[in-house]
Amino acid sequence: MGLDRAALLANKKIKARLLSFEKEIDDYRDALNTEGVWLFLSTLGCWGVTNQNLQFFAFIITIILFFNRIRLKLSDMRLFIIRVKEIEELITSVLRFSDFKKERLDDLAKIKKEKLSLFTHVKAVPIYLICYVFLLLSFLNLFFDFDLLSWLVVQSYGIG
């Protein structure tokens, strides 16, 4: 009976950890989208700097501030995939003699599939991705006189 009670308690704690992990993934994505808006506005501000050298530093400062703001919003700095492996090892070791082991591993597999796939990530952070691409294109324009509009016309219509 003691083993069953211990297994129930361990299962409950691991289930709570899985729910917490899933919430952290969602919170991280929400933070990326929110910070993406600020990244966009900061990038627009960089365009207002007339001196090219100062504009370069403005872009660098924008990138540093952006990544620092994201870092401050993370409760755990480790990659999600590393944390998945740790949770998997925890489930395997703590629930090794329990019927709950398969259920929790299935829960973890579901989180990996629904929350950590590339497609899901792209779908969950569109604002961030668009703003980051805008920053990249702005950077290309600054250093290489990259004319985005001309490039798009050539790519789309073969005109050039």
Image (spheres, rainbow, N blue to C red):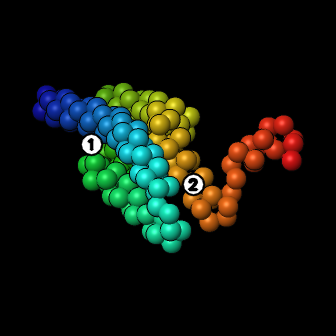
Label 2 crowd bin: few (<14), some (14–19), many (20+), radius 10 Å: many
Disc ID at residue 24: none
Residue with the most extreme bottom position: 53
| Three-letter code, disc 2 | Ser
Residue type marked 1? Val
Q: Decide if residue 130 is in sight here.
A: yes
Picture layout, residue 1 above or below residue 153? above
Q: Nearer the viewer, mark 2 or mark 1?
A: 2
The image shows residue 55 at horizontal and vertical percentages of 48, 65
Secondary structure of the residue carrying numbered label 1: helix
Q: Residues within 10 Å of mark 1 (few under 14, many from 20)?
A: some
- Residue 23: % across, % down: 30, 34
* Gap in angstroms between the C-alphas marked 2 and 1: 50 Å
Q: Residue furthest front?
A: 50
Q: Quadrant of the N terminus?
A: top left
Taking depth in this image into account, of 45 and 134 the one nearest to the observer is 45
The image quarter in which residue 16 lies: top left
Q: How many marks?
A: 2
Whether pointer 2 and pointer 1 mark residues with C-beta atoms closer than 8 Å, the reply is no
Could one spot residue 18 in this view of the protein?
no
Can you give x and y, in whole percent of width and height, for residue 17 in the image? 26, 37
> Which residue occupies 53% across, 68% down?
52
Q: Nearer the viewer, residue 7 or 145?
A: 145
| Residue to which mark 1 is pinned | 94
Q: Is residue 52 above or below residue 5?
A: below
Residue at the location (50% across, 44% down)? 131
Residue 102 located left or right of residue 139 = left
Residue underneath mark 2: 138
Residue shown at 47% from the left, 37% from the top: 127
